Image: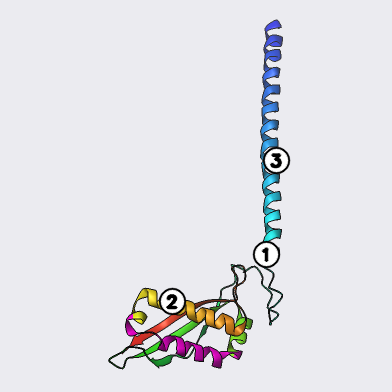
Amino acid sequence: MAKTEDAAAGEKPKSKKLLIIIIAALLVVLGGGAATFFLMSKGAHEDEEDTEAPPKAKHESKAKAKKPAAPPTFMPLDAVVVNLADTGSTRYAQVGITLQVEDAATADLVKQYMPAIRNGILIAISRRTADQLLSAEGKEELANEILTLIRKATDTEEYRGYSPVEAVLFSSIIVQ
């Protein structure tokens, strides 16, 4: 019986040590989780403050965090046909453009400015040569120029990385 008491006495300190180690590990994990939660929630509040629209904006479009679950709205424009700036020969281009906007409200806003936007697009394309339109770099430059033009015309210029007018996409480019 003396052996069983010694064996039982020997096991209890081990179980106490094991219990202390488990509690310490649990406290470390919980502390790390609480610190992560605190830092993440503080970062979310700072992001909300950063997405406010500038006070000089003409339109009351609130800059808000984009909802990744909501698909964007695509707004096809009428194809434009323009003379190109090639010297020595007359070259034409037919360009189909689709705008990627945040939602239907932004599409309606863009439609209000469509005559000015089409004029700017025609001028931007007519400044290009056929070689510029056929190169990847030339297409990217044209898309960026048109995007900037649309954002300025609709007063939806990019503010801290956000604009409801998201992209200019080419649906077709034909050069003759």
Q: Is residue 74 visible?
A: no
- Residue corresponding to mark 2: 141
- Sequence-wise first label, 3 or 1: 3
Q: Relative to 45, is 159 above or below? A: below
Q: How is the image coloured?
A: rainbow
- Residue corresponding to mark 3: 31
The magenta stretch spans residue 1? no
Quarter occupied by residue 47? bottom right
Magenta extent: 112-131
x then y, percent, for residue 72: 56, 75
x then y, percent, for residue 119: 50, 92
**Left or right: 57 as drawn, with respect to 110:** right
- Secondary element type, mark 2: helix
- Residue corresponding to mark 1: 50
Q: On the rendered image, what quadrant is the C terminus found in?
A: bottom left
Under mark 2, the amino acid is Glu
Q: On the rendered image, what quadrant is the N terminus found in?
A: top right
Under mark 1, the amino acid is Asp
- Sequence-wise first label, 3 or 2: 3
Which residue shows up at 70% across the image and 40% down it? Answer: 31
Q: Main secondary structure of the magenta part?
A: helix
Under mark 3, the amino acid is Gly
Quarter occupied by residue 54? bottom right
- Secondary element type, mark 3: helix
Badge count: 3
